[in-house]
Amino acid sequence: MAGLTIGGGVGIPLQWLDGTVFDSYFWPGIILGFVVGGVQAIALAAHYRGYRLAWGLHAMAGLTMMIWIFAEIAIMLVWSPLQGIYFFTGLVQTCLSVLALGGWPRPLLGRYE
């Protein structure tokens, strides 16, 4: 967030915003910080405080990260390897939290009777 708002895009070409509603990286940085970063911070705080809701919030945070990256690529029509890394971390966070919520069958190859 700080790099996009204060840093002016931290080296990301301003041309990537051509054809979007944004003329600078300030508002995307604000949205990124409060939406994506806010959900991640809430999930982390719930986890450290021991709330049962924490794993569900982690799943929501991972999905928020993936949706952000997908929307970013769809709006800017540009892809960078960093977006792939962030999408993958959101996917891993979502999958691990779903497994922690009991999404892993026991026994793994058991059958319904």
Image (tube, rainbow, N blue to C red):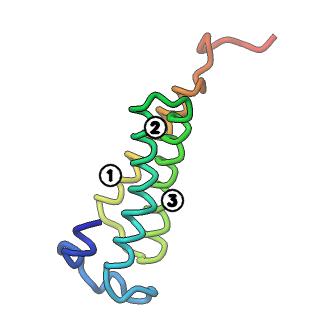
Answer with mark 1 or mark 2, whichever residue precedes in sequence. 2
Answer with mark 3 or mark 1, whichever residue precedes in sequence. 3
Q: Position of residue 101 (x, y in %)?
A: 57, 27
| Closer to the eye: label 2 or 3 | 2
> Which residue lies under the disc numbered 1?
85
Taking 40 as reference, is 110 left or right? right
The relative height of residue 80 versus residue 96 in the rendered view (above or below) is below
- Count neighbours of disc 1 (C-alpha within 10 A) and say few if under 14, some if 14 to 19, many if 20 or more: few
Task: Give the CA distance from mark 2 to mark 3.
Answer: 22 Å
| Closer to the eye: label 1 or 2 | 2
Q: Amino acid at mark 2?
A: Ala
Q: Which residue is pictured at 58% across the width and 22% down the height?
A: 104
> Which residue lies under the disc numbered 3?
67
Q: Quadrant of residue 112?
A: top right
Q: Position of residue 20 (x, y in %)?
A: 44, 85
Q: Secondary structure at mark 2?
A: helix
